[in-house]
Image (cartoon, rainbow, N blue to C red):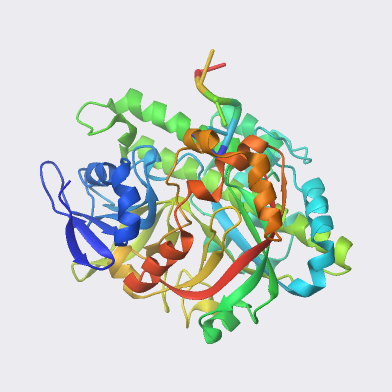
Amino acid sequence: MELKRINDYTWEIPKEGDMKVPALIYTSAKLLESVRRDMTLKQAKNVACLRGIQRKSYVMPDAHQGYGFPIGGVAAFDMDDGIISPGGVGYDINCGVRLLRTDYTERDIHERRAQLLAEMSKAVPAGVGKGGITRLSRNVLLEVCAKGAEWAVENGYGTREDLERTEESGRMEAADPSYLSPRAVERGIPQLGTLGAGNHFLEIQKVSEIYDEQVSRVFGIDSVGQVLMMIHCGSRGLGHQVASDYIRLMENKFGIRGLPDRELINAPIRSQLGERYYKSMSAAVNYAFANRQMIAHWVRDVFAKVMGSSEGMSQVYDVCHNVAKFEKHKIDGKEREVCIHRKGATRSFGPGREEIPEIFRSVGQPVIIPGSMGTASYILVGTSEAEQLSFGSTAHGAGRVMSRHEALRRFRGEQIKQEMESRGIELKSTSWKGVAEEASGAYKDVDEVVKVSHKAGLGKLVAKVVPVGVMKG
DNA sequence: ATGTAC
């Protein structure tokens, strides 16, 4: 494939054939090798062919192949001529990350980290298909999907301050749960307040490096050794069902003829089906916000029980990694509203954007990038440059280099756990198979991913954290 | 990611 090197961290696939715009890949020579081995670049070119796409089809440094669109793909579409696509959001709608700070240091919790993990695994149900401890009626589930994290706070899970420190304040107003299929509702009812499986986790972390003292202090990250709690999960079976439902509905309505790949099925944003998908997707987004809100509340309960207090455990921020949204961006010098798809990408807004909470508005929003199991994670800050470079987006994680299937062939869960424990990291999981699939060897080097983000200007380094204890689904 | 197939 023809790739034009723009600079050390940017490559372009020039417009050709049916492409309406070029594709732009933020990567390094090292990361480019793995991206060239799978379908990522072909998929980025396919996205560039879709109707109404603006500026470029963007690829983030952690990208790998996904359903239709690459994971680590960002694309914006014209509100009048453009499309919205379930494959551009992904199956796990509003998969995302929440970060809590604490007043504890690693020393304070060292002796009790196994106990913290044991209590968390009692308090937070995890695993494939796992149900939760809440008993919801159908009507309450619909209310959760309409109100998101607000519902959770109103029902005793956490504080209003948490909402301020959540993307969209924990609630997408566009949500209309009445468009959810009966099956989506049915799957959502038992799973609210559950972690799930795959790459979802709870992690006890300690700050290992601070790159920007001023910004980190604004985020509530004060010193090396400070303990943080990271929560990574999404919308479970409900979001998955919304994606499946609308992929099928759109295929039936529009057919797959003329698409470069049937997985790119989409609907005009202004069509009935496009609007219904957006409202249903927003309902799933809200379900995921409520999910993380409840889990965060239980994590605080666990600290209160094991450590004696959860005081000081305020939220740093909560970000979406898989979402489509209507946002205003400057295109060809003119401010316009577009439909942004961020699939495996984090919003990275810089100073001044009205969408970010006032407390962060002078420095930019927190960007939370989890690594793979047993590796570092990073806190970055959004930049103004990113708005021109990538519609205000950066990476969302390490990004796979190996399929789950291949990881199962190569790794053993028991051995991975042993290796982590020899490095002083506790691991608790419901599934050896899950641990093998999530081995860090199946992922890219997150240090390299965030270096590209920093150097390219997509999001700037603020702090590095390392795991102390990990709970996997 | 996912009641890893409806």
In the displayed structure, A87 sits above or below A367; it is above
A195 on left or right of A454:
right
A234 on left or right of A114:
left
- Image point (55%, 85%), residue name: A213
The percent coordinates of residue A413 (x first, y second) are 64, 40
A382 on left or right of A79:
right
The percent coordinates of residue A277 (x first, y second) are 43, 39
**Outermost bottom residue:** A214
In the displayed structure, A121 sits above or below A241; it is below
The percent coordinates of residue A217 (x first, y second) are 60, 83
Q: Name the residue nearer the viewer: A137 or A433.
A: A433
- Image point (78%, 47%), residue name: A121
A328 on left or right of A353:
left
- Image point (63%, 73%), residue name: A207
Q: Is residue A52 visible?
A: yes
Q: Quadrant of residue A239?
A: top right
The percent coordinates of residue A327 (x first, y second) are 37, 61
Q: Name the residue nearer the viewer: A198 or A19.
A: A198
| Quadrant of image for the C terminus of chain A | top right
